[in-house]
Structure formats: C-alpha cells, structure tokens
Amino acid sequence: VAVAVAVAVAVAVAVAVASSTAQQASRKPPLNAPAKTTRAMSDLEKMVIDARLAARESAGMEAAARERALIAVRESLCANRDKICAANAEDKAAAIKAGLDAPLLKRLDIEGAKFDAMLSKVDEVR
C-alpha cells in the first residue's frame, strides 16, 4: 500500500504544482505552519502533509521549472513502473488477505490502464 500511496502522492503533487497559481498560494497558510493534530500522525498523513507543503512551495515556480519537475515525475514513474506494479501486486494480495472490500480493492489497483491514465494526467498538466 505504501508504494501505491507514494505514487498517488507524487502524482497529486505534480497535478497540484501545475494547477496552482501564485494567487492561490498567497491565500494558503505559511509553509512552516504546523499541522494541527491531537494524535500521532500516520505515515500516510505525513506524506499527504508533505505533498501539500511541496505543492504550496512550488506554486510560485516558473513555468520552465514546473515543466522540468513534471517531466522528472513522469520519467521516474516510467523507469520504476515494473517495481511499482510488483509492489502494487503485493499490496493487493495483502489487502485481499485482510478482507478489504471490493470497492477499496479497485481503488488500490494502479496497474495497466490505471497506470497509463496516471501518466496521461501528468502529461495533461504539463
């Protein structure tokens, strides 16, 4: 699950970076604002917060820098596709064993057409 989440976070960051504007960023809390929580954060929550901070930080990036970042994300996804899909298969097997409901299992799957769609979304925001 961690690999699938990391990939999803990377894509979310890429999409957020590309679609953010300096005006939107100016309405956000400061980058160093602490996360408001009264309990220990999970690794997933930390990754989401890190992704949001990265998106805010990069919202003011010049178009060329954003383009380079998105190209790097896409290249990394393509270069690691086999590893990502293998880890995803392990995650799905563990989820099935744990009795995860079918709709959640469907969301967990990022192989084949879903992986290609993820790459297309990165291309769209470039």
Image (cartoon, rainbow, N blue to C red):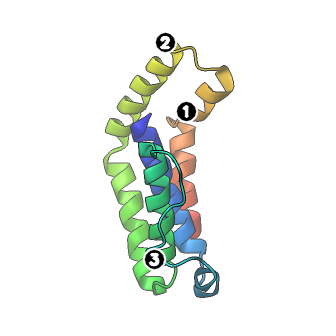
Residue 23 versus residue 49 in the image, above or below: below
Q: Amino acid at mark 2?
A: Lys
Of 25 and 14, which appears nearest the observer?
25
Which residue is nearer to you in this view: 110 or 28?
A: 28
Question: Which sits earlier in the primary sequence, circle 3 or circle 1?
Answer: 3
* Kind of element beneath mark 3: helix
The quadrant in which the N terminus is found is top left
Q: Is residue 21 above or below residue 110?
A: below
> Which residue bears the numbered disc 1?
108
> Real-space Cα distance between discs 3 and 1?
28 Å
Q: Quote the CA–CA distance across marks 2 and 3.
A: 39 Å
Q: Nearer the viewer, residue 104 or 44?
A: 44
Q: Amino acid at mark 3?
A: Glu
Closer to the eye: label 1 or 2: 2
Q: Which residue is mark 3?
A: 57
Circle 1 Cα neighbour tier, 10 Å, few/some/many (<14 / 14–19 / ≥20): some
Three-letter code for the amino acid on which mark 1 is drawn: Leu
The 10 Å Cα crowd at callout 2, few under 14, some 14 to 19, many 20 or more, is few
Q: Residue at x 43, y 60 (%)?
A: 50
Q: Are marks 3 and 1 in contact (CB under 8 Å)?
A: no
Q: In the rendered image, is residue 20 in sight?
A: yes
Q: Is residue 103 left or right of residue 15?
A: right
- Say whether residue 126 is visible: no
Residue 47 pos. (x, y %): 44, 52
